[in-house]
């Protein structure tokens, strides 16, 4: 692939390699050029815009968000800037928490079961424990999904 005299790639060899591997000639040529420049063809990292927050600040955001589950991204942004002096936007906090796996969730609200409810449910289950498939075929099941016609105003978003 490289001519022995001046260590430059031979055009025919690049074509053969690109056809054999199914890769464009420009890719092979670029890899050869990078190899001759640095002696290395590994991928260059640290490209792109550097992050505003450090891994320690990301950890601080995670701990703070998990400690106070009702805090919003704006609240966390203010807390981070007061604690570390790093000013970040609400959207940055939202993205960092998303990478960590902390997302906005609305708390589930339900009516707790009283002792009477528990007793009635147990009685019902005992009555129906020995039903046959024929008897169960007459029952219409539902997944008891709740449908709202209005938006859920209880959501606290981060």
Image (cartoon, helix red, strand yellow):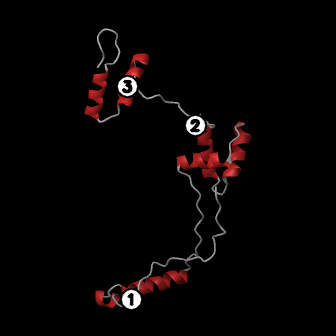
Disc with the residue nearer the chain's start (1 vs 3): 3
Give 87 or 83, whichever is nearer the viewer. 87
Residue 100 at x, y percent in the picture: 54, 47
Mark 1 or mark 2, earlier in chain: 2
Horizontal side of 98 relative to 44 (left or right) equals right
- Disc 1 + disc 3, Cβ < 8 Å: no
Above/below status of 125 relative to 65 = below
Badge 1: residue crowd in 10 Å (few <14, some 14–19, many ≥20): few
Secondary element type, mark 2: helix
Q: Helix, strand or loop at disc 3?
A: helix
Q: Which mark is residue 93?
A: none
Residue underneath mark 3: 29
Instruction: Name the quadrant containing residue 138.
Output: bottom left
Residue 123 visible from this viewpoint: yes
What is the C-alpha distance between the residues marked 1 and 3? 71 Å
| Cα separation between marks 1 and 2 | 56 Å
Mark 1 vs 2: CB contact within 8 A: no
Q: Nearer the viewer, mark 1 or mark 3?
A: 3
Instruction: Please report whichever mark, 3 or 2, sits nearer to the chain's N-terminal start.
Output: 3
**Residue 88 in the figure: left or right of residue 127:** right
Which of the two residues, 15 or 86, is positioned nearer the viewer here? 15
User: Residue 136, position in %: x, y?
Assistant: 34, 87
In the image: residue 149, left or right of residue 20: right
User: Label 1: which residue?
Assistant: 139
**Rendered image quadrant of residue 42:** top left
Q: Position of residue 151 (x, y in %)?
A: 63, 71
Q: Position of residue 79 (x, y in %)?
A: 71, 45
Q: Residue tagged by mark 2?
A: 55
Image point 43% across, 86% down: which residue?
124
């Amino acid at each position: 692939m490289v001519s022995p005299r001046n260590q430059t790639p031979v055009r025919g060899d690049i074509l053969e390699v690109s056809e054999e591997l199914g890769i464009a000639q420009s890719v092979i040529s670029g890899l050869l050029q990078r190899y001759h420049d640095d002696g290395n063809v590994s991928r260059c990292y640290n490209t792109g815009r550097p992050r505003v927050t450090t891994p320690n600040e990301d950890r601080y955001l995670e701990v703070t968000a998990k400690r106070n589950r009702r805090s919003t991204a704006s609240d966390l942004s203010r807390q981070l800037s007061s604690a570390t002096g790093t000013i970040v936007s609400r959207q940055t906090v939202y993205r960092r928490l998303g990478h960590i796996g902390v997302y906005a969730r609305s708390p589930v609200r339900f009516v707790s079961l009283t002792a009477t409810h528990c007793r009635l449910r147990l009685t019902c289950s005992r009555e129906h424990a020995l039903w046959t498939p024929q008897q169960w075929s007459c029952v219409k099941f539902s997944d008891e999904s709740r449908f709202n016609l209005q938006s859920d105003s209880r959501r606290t978003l981060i």
